[in-house]
Amino acid sequence: MVNILPSPDSSPLTTEERYRLLAENSSEIVYQTQGLDISWIAPSVTRVLGWEPHELIGQPAVKLISQHQDRTWVDANRIKLERGEDVSQEMLLNAKDGGDKWFSGVAHPIQGDDGSLQGFIVSMRDIDQKVRTRKKLQESEQKFRAAMVNAAVAVALTDANDRIIDVNEAMVRFLGRSAKELRGLKMDDLATPEDPESDAALFDELMSGKRESYRTTTITERLDGKTYFGDLNISTVRDEDGQVTWIINQILDITEQVGVRQRLVQMATIDSTTGLLNRASIVERLEESIRETLSWGGNIAVLLVDVDRFRSINDSLGHAAGDQILAELGERFERAVGKRAIVGRYGGDEFLLIIPGAGTERELANVVGQVTAAVGQEFTIAERRVVLTASLGASFHTPLTSALGMIQEAAVALTEAKRQGRAQLQVFDTVLSNAARYRLQVEQELREAIDRKEFVVYYQPIIKLETFQPIANEALVRWNHPTDGLTGPVTFIEIAEESGLILGIGRQVLEQVCRDIKTSTALKGKVAVNVSAVELSDPGWLDSALAIITESGIDPRRLTIEITETAVLSTGRDIKTDLAILRNLGIGLMVDDFGTGFSSISLLRDLPLTGLKLDRSFVDKMLNVDGPENKLAQGLAQLADALNIHGVAEGIESQEQAIALRDMGWTYGQGYHFARPAPLVEN
């Protein structure tokens, strides 16, 4: 909508001339009143509502309002206008032909020299289609809820996060819990799909709008110990903007029909995609191999193989292509290891190999090499060349280890292989065992810490190098551990990110920063908040962050979001739209650790950044005037200046570094030379 409201200091004549010039060329309805009567109205009213201007001039403004709309808001709005406040209102207006149309109106008071209300200026925008669509949706929702209550089929309404909003009586009977118990629980946990991987893909397509509905078979383990099977049909209800408001889950009880089929499935031993032993069968075969090994005192190892970033294959080429790769991998593995190992598909893109006779890494090496070579051979899928790598975790049998215990140990080793950078082998040992226990302990403590709000925010000032005066701050999280005391992020951030708990920590940090900005007089200028790759990858992060900022009531321009280029490149989804939304609100965007990755320059081109931070690795070595770090630091300062974005040099620990960076052209600096991170202290 064109902003036609005059500035408070404009003279009446200048205001009216400018106002009418804009209004006469506007596609909206614009009018001015003298008192409560229309004194002038833009010619656009003829095209929009059919009235000629002279038919309305001199008439009360309320003549435009349809008799079908409740007018109780009129007096309240008039009081606000008399106080000098702008008011906005959705209004149903009369068209000359007798029809009604919805508009969104904004009224600005015109006051006399004595402050009395002389009239007002109103600008109205056509929102008829939007309002009618919304009302139809509301009516449809009411009808659907009424039909759902009495439906014979079990129905549950869930939100976009799969949490139950409402259920009918049939669903209560099917799940064996009351409606009160079910609300807020995840539907997926109550009616679990038989094929979670396939269901996840279908659900993603449903939420993205690629399909309107889908069906799947679910298994429900009820609290009374009974197992129920359902034919689940899932569809969505979307609002006028196409966003999912509800997910409709309709379940037909097929427990009796599934009974025979389930027994046959339990008897089956072959994975349908790869032709290999399926999960249950490979575990059973491992148990048999362990018994045989124990009978003659031999050795045995297991190798868990996970295809790196396999999800990108499904996302880019489709699930059929992914299944084709899995099938070919299964064939390659069996050809490669021959009779030296037993191969099975453990689930998803994971394969499990049982290797009798292997008791050391050296004895395992031959099979590992063959498996790695099999994965590394080029695939041709849908006329496209695909090259893959795999992460591997291995464990060896001990007298106290069960089949599932060996697989769990291999899984721990596999997780470590991924954490170390993927495309490698890790073998389970006591070090990994202790590390795994430690990580589980920290993860549990982090969950409790989030519940107890043990995280605190420290602030480190950002200095203007020309004056050496603080102009902004960076917010840094600390954990006030109940027994270990205050600990820095290096002790817990990695585990928090891998476990997904960083989402809860990030929310608490942002909430604290917003409270401090709102209430503290000591916190001046912008405040930078770090956001991790895990947070950026979460589709709900932006909505959560905006809700926190809005509820706090702060000016969004006081915030800067810091992201690393690694975070941007590893999110797995396009975040440009999210970042653009933040920038449109006035929130700054700064790339941290700049210059350490492979795509720094492209980030400056592709993202709406307001600043960059020179990584401390450049600052550490920059006093060597002939070194490459010095030249790059100087060049990056010039680049930031040319792009008109803020440049902040991190890790300044001496006066010499500060002066050198200033002379290079760096505007801002940060580091222990100026101040260490500290809690907020009021002046």
Image (cartoon, rainbow, N blue to C red):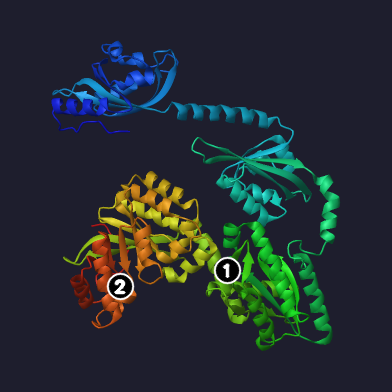
Three-letter code for the amino acid on which mark 1 is drawn? Leu
* In this rendering, position of residue 244 left or right of residue 125: right
Q: What element carries label 2?
A: loop
Camera-side mark, 2 or 1: 2
Using a 10 Å C-alpha cutoff, classify the residue at mark 2 as few (fewer than 14 neighbours), some (14 to 19) or many (20 or more).
Answer: many
Quarter of the picture containing the N terminus is: top left
For the residue pair 344 and 407, the one nearer the viewer reads as: 344
Q: How far apart are marks 2 and 1 (CA)?
A: 32 Å
Q: Tell me, yes or no, if residue 677 can be seen here.
A: no
> What is the x, y in percent for residue 425?
60, 79
Q: Which mark is residue 440?
A: 1
Tell me what residue is drawn at x 59 percent, y 46 percent.
210
* In this rendering, position of residue 595 left or right of residue 666: right
Residue identifier under label 2: 651
> What is the x, y in percent for residue 538?
50, 55
Three-letter code for the amino acid on which mark 2 is drawn? Gly
